[in-house]
Image: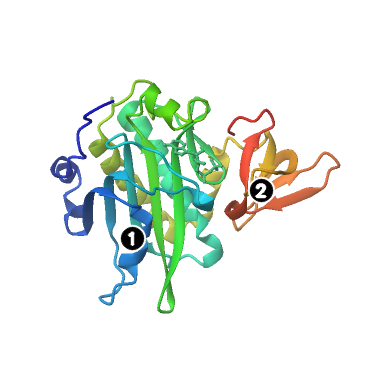
Amino acid sequence: MDNLAAFDVNNFLKYAPHWQSALLYFPTIGSTNQEARRLLQQPTGPRELLLLTDKQTSGRGRLNRRWEAPFGTGLLCTLTLPLAPLSLDQAYLYTAIVALSLKKAAEQEADQTLQLKWPNDLLRTGLKCCGILAELEQVKNKFWLAIGFGLNTGLTERDLTEAGLSDKATNVTPEAATISREAMLAATLGFLAEYRLRLTTEAEVVRQEWVTSLITLGEMVQVLDMDGQLRLKGRAVGVDPAGGLLVELSAGETRLVQAGDVSVRLANGHYA
Ligand code: ADP
């Protein structure tokens, strides 16, 4: 779609005025995660920020894979927040609560049911409509996170074809550009604030909510290495306390795979 409107910051702030002092909007930028990590290292010290853009020129997924989205076709942002009170091996719970918040917001704002795929994607009708990338940054002796997500809202068939994503990706709504990105973001951040609070008091309940939302569990999956080579095949049976996926091989043996270095597909090659 040509000439899509820029993200309307003033409209967003009508829904979520308290973000005013923490919001940074860039019409285009290399990558919001990268800029967020740079800002965390500024001499003035780290603080909670929300970086927003309409176009990334070097948007990334995990393993430095490209994230493709023409100007204005998605909700592209990064949040910075301290890892505390969670420990390093609980850091994945932030990805989990961003995914749960996006899912709730899509239900509320667009009447769409999204599926969570381990470890960091949201799907609609089996196609990826959102990717989340959480990166840890050590600032002096404390850890912070830069959590970025890209939610497709206005990709056309042509955009998808040009990016080679026709059989892989979709928008959050069946028709492109029918959701208010500003309302969607405000709703997501509202749910996220609730989940963050709950992580301080009932992290295990939140973790369970995430685990039970994962469509990956129970499915026959293929686990691919960084270079796309098949590492193993089996049934995804659970998630360990540090967020790793437990896969049961046909011989009955269970293997643990870590989110950082694998991709997971259904046994038939589709997303799960
Ligand atoms: P994986 O999908 O294997 O888990 P990542 O989480 O690292 O991989 O996400 C990067 C991948 O997402 C890219 O390799 C590409 O296939 C896909 N991708 C890129 N841009 C988009 C987009 N706008 N929508 C959906 N998927 C995308």
Q: Residue 120 in the image: x percent, y percent?
A: 51, 45
Q: Which of the 4 image quadrants contains residue 143?
A: bottom left
Q: Which mark is residue 127?
A: none
Nearer-the-camera pick, 226 or 267? 226
* Residue 40 in sight in this render: yes
Residue at 56 percent across and 63 percent down: it is 89
Picture quarter with the C terminus: top right
Q: Residue 230 in the image: x percent, y percent?
A: 71, 42
Picture quarter with the N terminus: top left
Query: Where is mark 2, residue-wise?
Result: 225
Q: Amino acid at mark 1?
A: Ala
Query: Which SS class for mark 2?
Result: loop
Dot 2: within a 10 Å radius of its alpha carbon, few (fewer than 14), some, or many (20 or more) residues? some
Q: Residue 186 in the image: x percent, y percent?
A: 26, 43
Query: Which SS class for mark 1?
Result: helix
Residue at 74 percent across and 39 percent down: it is 233
Q: Residue 43 in the image: x percent, y percent?
A: 28, 77
Query: Where is mark 1, residue-wise?
Result: 36
Of tags 1 and 2, the one toward the viewer is: 2
